[in-house]
Image: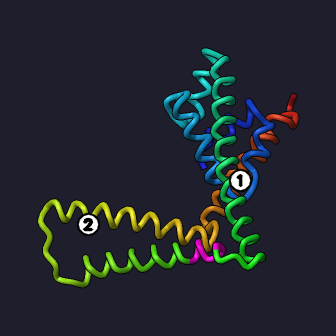
Amino acid sequence: MPPIIGLLLQYAPDLIGLLAGDKTGAAAGKVVDAAKVIFGTDDPKVAQAQIDADPKLAEVFVEQARAALEVFRLEIQDIQDARRQTLELNQSGSVMAWGAAIVSILVTIMFGGALFMVLWRSLTFDREQATIINILLGVLGAAQMQVINYWLGSSSGSKRSGDAVRTIAEKAIAETVLPRKGS
């Protein structure tokens, strides 16, 4: 994870709680995006030099990171609410509980069918058709990833990424909060 997170935690230790959790890697990505907007880079040395020249940049950075993390938190909450609704519909015996499963099946069939038509059939397409087919495959591929993410949740890669951010946060806290040797 980019070391810009340590810089953020130096200026806003209260954000650690927002960075902790299952989606830490994605949350850290939001912070890095905020750093790129404010400082034009995710290099903490360059960012620190800009803060040294204009200390108000640290406040702007922290506020931008807070806003990005709040939007991210609301997105996660929305996903959790949708899953909770599906569970409640299922428990009540509503036919609407089948919505996610039906959409997932349709997306998988459409993606598989489109891949079959392009890869295993010897069809020729003119330039316009090929463009439309590529767009269709891109959209269906993204939809298929959403289906996989819905049913399987976060990956082990997300966990590793979260562990990396936690390590960075703990190091930043130790450097900021604990007295340095020789002080």
Q: Is residue 151 magenta?
A: no
The answer to which of 129 and 32 lies nearer the viewer is 129
The answer to which of 141 and 8 lies nearer the viewer is 141
The answer to which of 133 and 15 lies nearer the viewer is 133
The answer to whether residue 116 is left or right of residue 122 is right
Where is residue 5 drawn, in percent x and y?
66, 41
Mostly what secondary structure, the magenta segment? Answer: helix
Q: Which mark is residue 14?
A: none
Where is residue 98 drawn, in percent x and y?
61, 77
Disc 1 element:
helix
The residue at the point 47 percent across, 70 percent down is 144
The answer to whether residue 174 is left or right of residue 44 is right
Tag 1: amino acid: Gln
The residue at the point 61 percent across, 73 percent down is 151
The residue carrying pointer 2 sits among few (fewer than 14), some (14 to 19) or many (20 or more) residues within 10 Å by Cα, namely some
Tag 2: amino acid: Ile
Question: Which is nearer the N-term, disc 1 or disc 2?
Answer: 1
In the image, the segment drawn in magenta is 96-101
Where is residue 30 drawn, in percent x and y?
60, 43
The residue carrying pointer 1 sits among few (fewer than 14), some (14 to 19) or many (20 or more) residues within 10 Å by Cα, namely few
Reading the image, the residue beneath label 1 is 77
The residue at the point 65 percent across, 42 percent down is 71
- Relative vertical location of residue 161 with respect to residue 124 in this rendering, above or below: above
